[in-house]
Amino acid sequence: MLRFGRRVQQIGSSFLVSLPSGWVKKNNLKKGNMVLIEINNDNTLSLFSSDLTGEELKEVTIAYSHISVDSIVNQIYGTYLLGYNIIRIKGTEEIAFDHRDRIKHTMRTLAGLEIIEEDSTNIICQFLLDAGTLDIEKILRRMNTIIAGMYKDTIDLLGRSYENNIRKSVVSRDAEVDRQYFLLVRLIRSAMLDPQLATKLNLSNIDILDYRIAANHLENAGDYIKDFAKALPRLESKELLNEIIEASILTVRMQEKSVTAFVNNNRIESSEIIKLYNKFNQLMDSIKELSAFRNRPEEPMLSISLLNSVYSMDKIARCWVDVADLVKPSYLK
């Protein structure tokens, strides 16, 4: 980061500060051009060239080919995450029905993206949300709420007969976690490229980095909970069941505390996560011992599905430890 010292001058009732010549040239400013000055929450000033005022509609065209629909889907995700507002799928031939269906399904999985025009050879969609009105904290909390519901329903399955509808519901909700995750990543990338947007969202560079990492941990947690719900076996051992429920309750508390600590930058709250994780690890060791060494008919040896469940539980808990680790030390506030 470059810094420049300037003396404040006064002409009449106005106070003037000269601009660094390198910054003026880089932004192609000339006499009479308008610049935008914003007062930040910490009483600092942010300065933007007039080119950054108003929202730029970035457009991209993706060529359709019937032999590369996977590539088209990947490009849709990529251009969305890069902040493009209008995405055109343009073909020289008719778009096949199954390809059209897959392309439109991909677009619908991306929050804020709506199809605005369509014919036999073209599909055009536009991002209709105003990035400046979005709240990165609310998006993260929304992800967290969905994940908490997924985990609660998975815990409720413990000790019950197979409830396929509940399992399917848990698995399907992971798609909404991904949807919010993509929106958050798009917003973060846009803020990195647009200092004015970052200022409007009240995000420093380290905030942008931390939210990106936190969102990734939450998205991973959603995937692990989905795996947990799929692998969860019916448990006949009451002792084993009770310990798994106890460990799951600890994980729920870790999730609540870690995300709250992160968004509030509460170092004291984040330190509690480590204590909870230590208790969780002790229970995990006990669960493994109960499962592996008791070879009675009513308490069978550890099955593959139970091993997978225990492994998923540990990965879920680790996500909340990693989120808590992002809380800044007090001297960085």
Image (tube, helix red, strand yellow):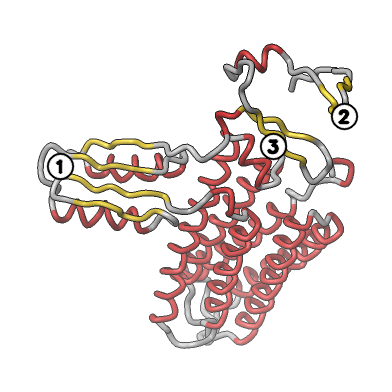
289 up-or-down from 12: above or below: below
Left or right: where 184 falls relative to 141: left
Percent of width and height locating residue 9: 88, 20
Report the residue at 64% width, 16% height from top.
31
Residue picked out by circle 2: 13
7 up-or-down from 35: above or below: above
Q: Residue reaching furthest front? A: 12
Report the residue at 87% width, 29% height from top.
13
**How dense is the environment of label 1, judged by Cα within 10 Å: few (below 14), some, or many (20 and up)?**
few
Q: Mark 1 vs mark 3: which is more N-terminal?
A: 1
**How dense is the environment of label 2, judged by Cα within 10 Å: few (below 14), some, or many (20 and up)?**
few
Are circles 2 and 3 on residues that touch, CB within 8 Å?
no
Report the residue at 67% width, 59% height from top.
320
Left or right: where 172 falls relative to 104: right
- Please tell me which residue lies in front, 223 or 31: 31
Secondary element at image label 1:
loop
Report the residue at 53% width, 68% height from top.
309
- Please tell me which residue lies in front, 299 or 135: 135
Q: Mark 1 vs mark 2: which is more N-terminal?
A: 2
Residue picked out by circle 1: 66
Percent of width and height locating residue 210: 68, 45
Percent of width and height locating residue 22: 67, 12
Q: Amino acid at mark 2?
A: Ser
Give the alpha-carbon distance from disc 1 to disc 2, as whole Å: 67 Å
Residue picked out by circle 3: 205
Left or right: where 54 falls relative to 124: right
Q: Residue reaching furthest left? A: 93
> Disc 2 vs disc 3: which is toward the camera?
2
Among the 4 quarters of the image, the one containing residue 287: bottom right
Q: Amino acid at mark 1?
A: His
Q: Amino acid at mark 3?
A: Asn
Are circles 1 and 2 on residues that touch, CB within 8 Å?
no
